[in-house]
Amino acid sequence: MKLSRRHFLKGTAALGATSVAPVMTGLNMAHASQDDYKALVCIFLFGGNDAYNMVIPDGGDAYGEYFAARPDLAISQNDLVKLNIASDNGVKLGLHPAMDSLKTAFSEENATVIVNSGQLVEPIIGENNPNSRVPDFLMAHNLQQTMWQSGAENMDDKLGWAGRMVQGMDLSGSLSPLMSLNGEQKWLRNNYVEPLVMTSEGAGDYNGLNNSDRVGAMMRHFDEKYANLFADNYSTTMANRYHENGALDEVLASTGDLDGFPQTGLGNMLHTTAKLIKARNTASLQHNRQVFFVGLGGFDTHKDQVGAHAALLGQVSDALAAFYQEMKVQGLADNVTAFTMSDFGRRIMANDSGTDHGWAGHQLVVGGAVKGGKAYGNWPDLMPGSEYDYNNGRLIPEIAADQVNATLANWFGYQGDLEKLFPSLKTFPQNTLDFL
């Protein structure tokens, strides 16, 4: 029999345990001590999040500049979620009032803000260089999403930075440690192990297989040894996906449902993520490292932003807060780091009832390993014509996305050359930041 379920599970278990054993040592071993477990969870905010209405100055001249720049969209200082943190240049920060559920993580100093970050290929702020290089395709949704997932100077690489990182660490398991609950994503692509792509609820359904005759016909197709290589490989691939789906379904069923997650799209994704983390030691996973991609769309707020953006931020906050709480329940808060990415920030000045595409934004990072109690980066000068003003209120980032990404990879246990993983780092004074 070519690919029965029993043979599939037996074969993948053997693969996870032994296929790369000769080259794995220490942190590189997928089956190393479970005390060393770590996971990264990327929450992608598709469409370009208006980060300057997500994280807001809590008073002083900075709030005055913010209000003057967008009086019709500005959040009242009295309504801000008080964080008791400040940027590196001393600007106190608060959150949009829809994000009150994250206050606990900040008060426990297990959350922070990366201020004014974005795609850069070399430093611009403070360089006084009119010929500074800027990344290609600024403010283009699909290409900027690809850049976040590839690295600023890896756009031509067919692989994503998380996939290349995992490939460099020789990680494996009976099922892939790379998992997306939001479709196939470049961030996870690599030449080593196929990512698991699932629904927000986990394993998908094969709705057409509603009787034993159809199941039997499919199994015969899986078991057949075809003379044509294309047909034989296609059959093998289909069988692998079918059996992976069955194994994943069993893994998730073994954990049961977890408490406290909101019944939203992102809430469901992070609920399933938490279940897969809880099941990391099962025979079908055997994961010492895991990487997850989840996402939420709708952030392209060109009009009617006030209500729509509040609802989106509330969904992000509530789902992320529930996930953080579940990691504490599992005793894994220090082992799991969640962080946001988005296509780009948005223009500081409003466009009637919304905002146009911008450049710099802010990122949230949540987890027990986070060095909270402060924000990271300088709050920029929002005044027109400042050195941060790239084009009519589109702000230039001061922290490179690749510096943030390299910090995450370093924390995750990647021991390779960070400047090979992120070539743009060669142009910056430091490869990593101190938020983990």
Image (spheres, grey):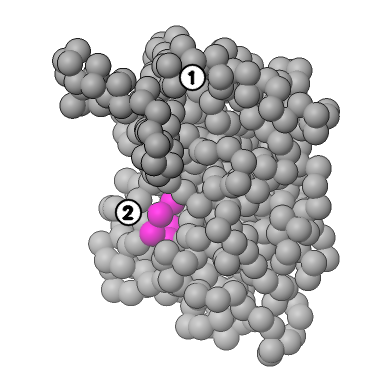
Q: How far apart are marks 2 and 1 (CA)?
A: 40 Å
At 50% from the left and 74% from the top, the residue drawn is 138
The residue lying furthest to the bottom in this view is: 130
Q: Which of 59 and 260 is in front in this view?
A: 260
Quadrant location of residue 260? top left
Amino acid carrying mark 1 in the image: Phe
At 52% from the left and 70% from the top, the residue drawn is 359
Horizontal side of 394 relative to 31 (left or right) equals: left
Magenta-drawn segment: 45-49
At 72% from the left and 66% from the top, the residue drawn is 424
Amino acid carrying mark 2 in the image: Gly
Quadrant location of residue 426? bottom right
Horizontal side of 400 relative to 156 (left or right) equals: right
Quadrant location of residue 21? top right
Mark positioned earlier in the residue sequence (2 or 1): 1
Q: Is residue 400 magenta?
A: no
Q: Nearer the viewer, mark 2 or mark 1?
A: 1
Does any portion of residue 113 appear in the rendered image? no
Quadrant including the C terminus: top right
Horizontal side of 342 relative to 432 (left or right) equals: left
The residue lying furthest to the front in this view is: 227
Q: Name the residue under label 1.
A: 8
Horizontal side of 145 relative to 213 (left or right) equals: right
Q: Name the residue under label 2.
A: 298
